[in-house]
Image: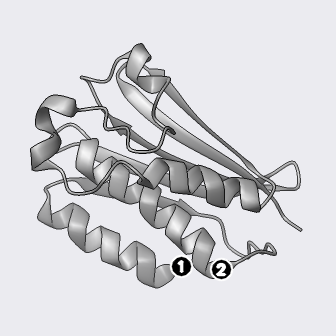
Amino acid sequence: METTLLYFESRAFESEHSLHLEIAEDLTMYGDALKIERLVGILIDNALKYADAKTEIQFCLTESNHRILLTCSNLCSDLTLEQMEHLFDRFYRAEESHSHQKEGFGLGLSIAQAITQQHKGEISASLQENRITFTVKLPKS
C-alpha cells in the first residue's frame, strides 16, 4: 500500500493539492491485497480529480469495532445531492459539463463498490458542507 500512497502523494503535489494521510500502525486484514490497493487508488484518484482547486484531501485508515475503516474526503463545492445518488452507478460522471477535462470512463466508484462487496464490506458517500466523504468498512477476517 505504501507504493500506492507514494504515487498519489506526488500526484497531489503536482495538482497543487495537499494529501493528509492518517494510517494506523499494525493493521492487518485478510483479503486480496491488490484489490484493496486498487480500492484505495480509486478513492484517492477520484478525490484528486474532483476536489476543489488547491484544497486538502484527507485519507484515513484505522480500526474500529473489529473492522477496518477507510475514509477519503475532499471539498467538492459543485456536487449536488442529486448527483450523490448516482456516484456508484457505472459510467456516471458527476461533472458532465467538464467531463472532457477529466480522464476516465465513470467506472472507478462502481469498481470500488464491487471490490468492497467482494470483501463483504460496505461503502458509502456522504456530503456535508461541500465536503464529500467516502467511507469503506471492511471486516478484518
Q: Which residue is mark 2?
A: 33
Residue found 70% across the figure and 78% down from its top: 32
Residue 20 appears in the figure: no
Report which quarter residue 44 is drawn in.
bottom left
The location of residue 26, given as percent across then percent down, is 73, 76
Mark nearer the viewer, 2 or 1: 2
Q: Is residue 136 left or right of residue 107?
A: right
Q: Is residue 82 left or right of residue 19?
A: right
Report which quarter residue 129 is drawn in.
top left
- How many numbered dots are placed on residues in this image? 2
Confirm or deny contact between disc 2 and disc 1 (CB under 8 A).
yes
Sequence-wise, which precedes: disc 2 or disc 1? 1
The location of residue 39, given as percent across then percent down, is 54, 63
Residue found 27% across the figure and 56% down from its top: 104
Q: Which mark is residue 107?
A: none
Residue type beneath disc 2: Ala
Q: Determine whether 30 is above or below 131 in the image.
A: below
Q: Secondary structure at mark 1?
A: loop
Report which quarter residue 97 is drawn in.
top left
Q: Which residue is mark 1?
A: 1
Q: Secondary structure at mark 2?
A: helix
Residue 42 appears in the figure: yes
The location of residue 29, given as percent across then percent down, is 79, 72
Residue found 60% across the figure and 50% down from its top: 113
